[in-house]
Image (cartoon, rainbow, N blue to C red):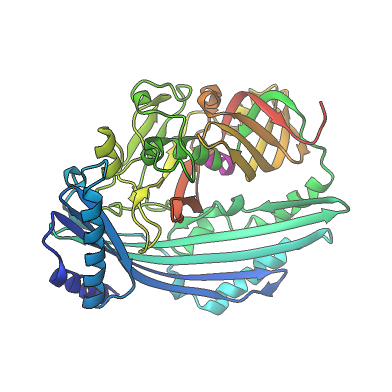
Amino acid sequence: MDQQHEQIAERFRRVMPRVDFCSLRIVHERSESLAVRQDVLQPVSNGDDLGTMVTVIHQGGCGYAGTSDLTEVGLSRALEHARGWAQRGAECSVTDFSQVGFAHLRGEYETPVAVAWDTVPLADKIALLQQESARLKTDERIVDWEASLWHTQSDTLYITNSDSHIRQRGFYTVPMLSVTANAGTETHTRTFGGRGYCRQGGLEVLDQTGFYTVAPQLSAEAVQLLSAPDCPTGRMNVLLAPDQMMLQIHESIGHPLELDRILGDERNYAGTSFVTPDMFGTYQYGSDLLNITFDPSRPEQYASYQFDDDGQPARREYLIKNGRLLRGLGGAVSQARLGMPGVANARADTWNRPTIDRMANLNLEPGTSDFSSMVGAIERGVYMKTNCSWSIDDSRNKFQFGCEWGQLIEDGRLTTVVKKPNYRGVSATFWRNLARVGNLDSYEVLGTPFCGKGEPNQVIRVGHAAPACVFSDVEVFGGEKE
């Protein structure tokens, strides 16, 4: 494939216009999805998608065009279209794109892989899923169950008229288990982190995430929820597992810190943000235990890379340190528009979408508390695992989240399992009630394949790593009446 991409790049070089800046981004993704549901193999799904995005900046305007016509004629037409939009945009744009400081770099990045997807025969992968499917059906009250694997290889090549040449190759593996139990009017589902155990790498991801051992536990928990009482209602401490912390970080830190959202670009679709530019450097986002990093350097994490899709070098940066808000999630264009630092996170989900500000790996750094001491410090509270519902306002401030699994904490001990645990809060105060942050023993690397944003919509990979955390004075509710 490398040779094919270089041939496309050479055609692009032959038809490059004389403009201030132009770039070509080739994206080639191949995927395979396997699933066994109720011990029956589902149709195998395969995808193969190849195309390019060209961008032109000239005399202050910016235009782009995507095409799957990879001939010289096709690329020339796309460049003409992009240049036309740049000319029209120069007359009315609020941004002088010619002043954006794009880096001019050459480099390569590839996901480290221990067990390549293609080295294991298809029949063996299907047999594995059939085995795990059978291990989920442990009780007659289990009415639905499924085991699945989804693997993607993504190859990109980015070149510019200023001699940038960046090649990146990512391998992504998403294991999933789901089991649903029913008794009368009660139905409960437990999943393998809500599809959160997605990582870069090959089939070694299954060992890393505990995929081979967790099926019986998920089934037992789904059945246990059938006879569990409702989660109590009231203000209390909440201990959130890493697979719920993932969603909490994503919705109430990640999206509010996207600079294009702060600039108002998303207001008509995904909303705005309660964060304003004057908050950076001074605003106390959370307690002094809150340390959030943008970290594309972890090789196993789902959204790791060396360069973003605008060719900017990516490195680990603190967004929030000791609770203080330092910088936002914005690429080169947003940084130029706001005149403040950001990170290398201009990303697009495929070849026919432009780059926009996106989360990549957004992590809550581990603290010093072990799990038993966090439980032991709680007089009255609930331990919650695995998100199953979420709602947050269009400024990413007020939120309400629900989890698959809950367990009461009484006088420093985990006691009764409860169903339908929910909690709500306000981002601007919730994080200031962060009371304890787990150490590396509870730290987990997670992510999501399905972060949606942009018009037209883009669904992109995001990574989140976090330990278990305790929040004080949280409004908790379930089915129990006050």
Magenta residues (range): 241-246
Asked if residue 83 lies left or right of residue 38, the reply is left
Confirm whether residue 197 shows in the render. Answer: yes
Name the one closer to the observer, 436 or 348.
348
The answer to which quarter of the image holds residue 285 is: top left
The residue shown at (14%, 64%) is 17
The residue shown at (25%, 61%) is 82
Q: Position of residue 230 (x, y in %)?
A: 80, 37
Which quadrant is home to the C terminus?
top right
Asked if residue 125 lies left or right of residue 101, the reply is right
Name the one closer to the observer, 135 or 337.
337
Residue 460: in magenta span: no
Q: Position of residue 371 (x, y in %)?
A: 59, 33
Name the one closer to the observer, 175 or 260.
260
Which quadrant is home to the N terminus?
bottom left
Q: Position of residue 354 (x, y in %)?
A: 34, 56
The answer to which quarter of the image holds residue 327 is: top left
Asked if residue 179 lies left or right of residue 282, the reply is right
Judged from this view, the residue extending furthest toward the left is 18
The answer to which quarter of the image holds residue 55 is: bottom left
User: Looking at the picture, does residue 303 appear above or below residue 118?
Assistant: above
The residue shown at (67%, 58%) is 178
Residue 243: in magenta span: yes
Q: Main secondary structure of the magenta part?
A: helix
Asked if residue 224 lies left or right of residue 454, the reply is right
Name the one closer to the observer, 166 or 56.
56
User: Looking at the picture, does residue 460 appear above or below residue 437?
Assistant: below
Confirm whether residue 212 shows in the render. Answer: no
